[in-house]
């Protein structure tokens, strides 16, 4: 029986198994996202913001359109006709001569009346006209339209700012939630590890008769109860991370590492007070409403201008010709030009112009009322946001104090338990209190960060602004 030489087995095995695959090729390195990168990514990927930016481009185009209303308009018109049957007319009453004069009609030389058919025009005719129209005076409508277009552009810019700040707030809340879920997972994981370690210690002591069966079973129960809490925390962490991925425009299967710390620096009272007075004028959504009021003011001007005459300067330059063979010789062509001023005046509109003015004025009054309401609402929101920050900081201070006491109490309890000076039940109570205090502290930090982010949105602090 033939056996291949051993060296031939090497390429066969290489072909069957393939080249070695490195761990880095199998598992791509996760993308690291801190708060700054998350916000920037969310701003780039948000579709609603893209629509708002498109509205801003549309507003810029309206400005150019408004400028065009004040500039001359040139038009070129051409026409070429083929006349298949030329128009004709008849002339009657022309005398006809007899035979002595060559008559062959058989009328004996008597004079008769005949109609003569005459065709007018040529088979082909063309015209080419270059026209110019320049508005001279439109009762201020062009200026009002230009101002309205610029106001609309500024309003669109403020809408983009407001939408961006909304995205920043949403991204911050999702990022902080992801951090909180990750930190809570670590707390519950630590609690489970401690419970398992104490369960093993209780088992050893139970075997040697140092603790009762009840204490050993309590240790078993505590370890078993700690595991579902960790599973729930891990599930919440995955969900929070997925929600953040969606906001960032990432695929749910993309490996992502959320990097950051749940840390909060207390707000200085002078910063709160300084921003309180600037909130109304710094809010981009309120600024958009103000631009809307100005836009409606220009609309009133336009509607009033419709009741006045409009003056235009016009001019034209025309080529015209006709021919039977499309050659159009000099004798068959003509050039003409004209210029003038014309006026349009809506002398009587059956009350339509006045009705439009009243509607525009009513829209303006409504917009001003809504702007005043927005100012009051912003002031209320600022006060509420400051109260939320104050409350969150008080809860954070209390939880920090409780966390320090709980950590110290648990360290003492663990030392006394290992030395046989404390029961398992007392140790479990200390560990449970520590776990709850840690989670409460993390949530207090999270709430304070959210309160700060909401306050920044309410007072109109833009992303990246130094305040």
Image (cartoon, grey):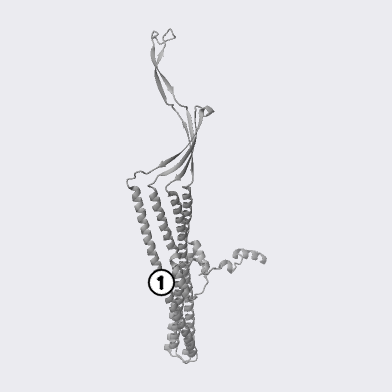
Q: Where is residue 336 in the image (x, y as percent from the top left)?
A: 49, 33
Residue under numbered circle 1: 383
In this picture, residue 12 sits left or right of residue 385: right
Query: Outermost residue, left direction?
Result: 350
In this picture, residue 323 sits left or right of residue 350: right
**Up/down of 462 relative to 92, above or below:** below
Q: Is residue 427 visible in the rendered structure shown here? A: yes
Q: Nearer the viewer, residue 443 or 91?
A: 91
Q: Which of 355 and 17 is in front in this view?
A: 355
**Up/down of 87 relative to 173, above or below:** above
Q: Is residue 236 visible in the rendered structure shown here? A: no
- Residue 94 lies in quadrant: top left
Q: Which residue is drawn at 41% across and 54% down?
A: 298
Counting labels gives 1
- Residue 297 lies in quadrant: bottom left
Q: Position of residue 184 (x, y in %)?
A: 47, 76
**Up/down of 62 relative to 400, above or below:** above
Badge 1 element? helix
Residue neighbourhood size for the residue with mark 1, other residues' Cα within 10 Å, grouped as few (<14), some (14–19), many (≥20): some
Q: Where is residue 228 in the image (x, y as percent from the top left)?
A: 43, 77
Q: Residue at x 43, y 90 (%)?
A: 212
The quadrant of the picture occupied by the N terminus is bottom right
Q: Position of residue 206 (x, y in %)?
A: 46, 89
In this picture, residue 57 sits left or right of residue 24: left
């Amino acid at each position: 029986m033939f056996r291949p030489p051993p060296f031939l087995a090497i390429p066969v095995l290489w072909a069957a198994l393939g080249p070695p695959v490195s761990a880095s090729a199998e598992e791509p390195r996760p993308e690291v996202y801190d708060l700054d990168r998350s916000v920037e990514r969310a701003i780039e990927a948000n579709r609603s913001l893209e629509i708002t930016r498109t509205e801003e481009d549309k507003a810029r185009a309206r400005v150019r359109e408004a400028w065009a209303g004040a500039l001359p308009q040139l038009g070129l018109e051409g026409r070429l006709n083929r006349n298949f049957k030329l128009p004709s007319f008849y002339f009657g009453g022309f005398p006809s001569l007899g035979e002595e004069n060559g008559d062959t009609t058989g009328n004996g030389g008597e004079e008769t009346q005949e109609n003569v058919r005459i065709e007018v025009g040529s088979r082909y005719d063309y015209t080419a006209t270059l026209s110019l129209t320049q508005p001279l005076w439109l009762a201020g409508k062009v200026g009002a339209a230009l101002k309205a277009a610029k106001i609309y552009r500024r309003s669109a810019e403020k809408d983009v700012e407001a939408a961006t700040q909304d995205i920043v707030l949403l991204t911050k809340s999702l990022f902080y939630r992801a951090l909180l879920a990750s930190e809570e997972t670590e707390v519950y994981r630590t609690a489970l590890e401690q419970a398992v370690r104490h369960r093993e210690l209780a088992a050893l002591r139970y075997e040697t008769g140092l603790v009762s069966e009840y204490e050993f079973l309590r240790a078993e129960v505590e370890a078993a109860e700690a595991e579902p809490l960790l599973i729930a925390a891990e599930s919440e962490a995955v969900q929070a991370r997925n929600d953040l991925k969606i906001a960032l425009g990432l695929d749910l299967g993309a490996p992502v590492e959320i990097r950051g710390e749940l840390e909060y620096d207390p707000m200085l009272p002078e910063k709160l007070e300084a921003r309180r007075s600037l909130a109304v004028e710094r809010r981009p959504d309120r600024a958009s409403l103000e631009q809307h009021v100005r836009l409606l003011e220009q609309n009133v001007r336009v509607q009033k201008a419709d009741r006045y005459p409009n003056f235009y300067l016009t001019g034209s330059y025309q080529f015209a010709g006709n021919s039977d063979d499309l050659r159009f010789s000099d004798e068959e062509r003509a050039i003409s030009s004209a210029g003038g001023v014309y006026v349009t005046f809506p002398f009587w509109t059956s009350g339509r112009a006045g009705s439009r003015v009243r509607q525009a004025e009513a829209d303006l009054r409504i917009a001003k009322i809504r702007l005043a309401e927005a100012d009051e609402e912003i002031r209320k929101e600022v006060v509420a946001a400051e109260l939320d920050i104050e409350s969150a900081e008080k809860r954070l201070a209390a939880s920090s104090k409780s966390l320090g006491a709980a950590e110290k109490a648990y360290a003492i309890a663990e030392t006394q338990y290992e030395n046989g000076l404390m029961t398992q039940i007392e140790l479990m109570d200390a560990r449970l209190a520590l776990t709850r205090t840690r989670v409460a502290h993390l949530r207090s930090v999270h709430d304070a960060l959210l309160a700060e982010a909401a306050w920044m949105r309410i007072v109109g602090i833009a992303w990246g602004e130094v305040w």
